[in-house]
Image (cartoon, grey):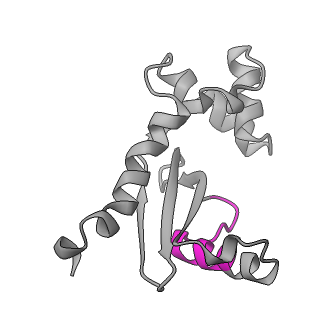
Amino acid sequence: PRGGALTPPRFCLEERRATRADDGGVADCEYFVGLEGGLVEEANGDLLCCAWIAVLTSDGASNCARTATFTLPPALSSLVRKGIELGRADDIVHGTVNSKQKGGTVGTLTAGQIDRTLYYKHAAVLALAPFANPRLHI
């Protein structure tokens, strides 16, 4: 992801460490899941949108998976390059309000065929797959 974001496994570990430092009972969970969405700039200048989901178990095993990736249209890319957050850029270009709390960019660009929930669902299932079928992942 853009802006020096942590890689998924490292993000998950850092979040877990922070949770342990300020426990609140969450640090003793069986699975700790980190989600990081962002933009990746291609060599040709295109901005690709994707997200990572990382899972860390209480015994230290980990796995991660990525969502589908899509290219941002030029109108969105231009605003993001000017420092405007993607959700706000969506609202400006498409005349919506708070789209990031609804279908997100993927929902707007697919006319609702894929919303944020569905977009992340497959990656979450894949990130958890080794723990659902451990004998296949030895």
What residue is drawn where x is 73% and y is 75%? 19
* Quadrant of the snapshot with the C terminus: bottom left
- Along the viewing direction, whichever of 101 and 42 lies nearer the viewer: 101
The answer to whether one can see residue 69 in this image is no
Is 25 covered by the magenta stretch?
Answer: no
Residue 70 percent location from the top left of the image? 45, 39
Q: x and y percent of residue 79 in the render? A: 74, 35
Tell me where residue 8 appears, x and y as whole percent.
53, 69
Q: Is residue 100 visible?
A: yes
Residue occupying image coordinates x 38% and y 61%? 128
Where is 48 relative to 115, above or below? below
Is-magenta flag for residue 10?
yes
The x, y position of residue 35, in whole percent, is 58, 58
111 w.r.t. 36: above or below? above
Q: Is residue 132 left or right of residue 49?
A: left
Which residues lie in the magenta part? Answer: 2-16
Left or right of 6 in this view: 71: left
Q: Is residue 58 left or right of residue 27?
A: left
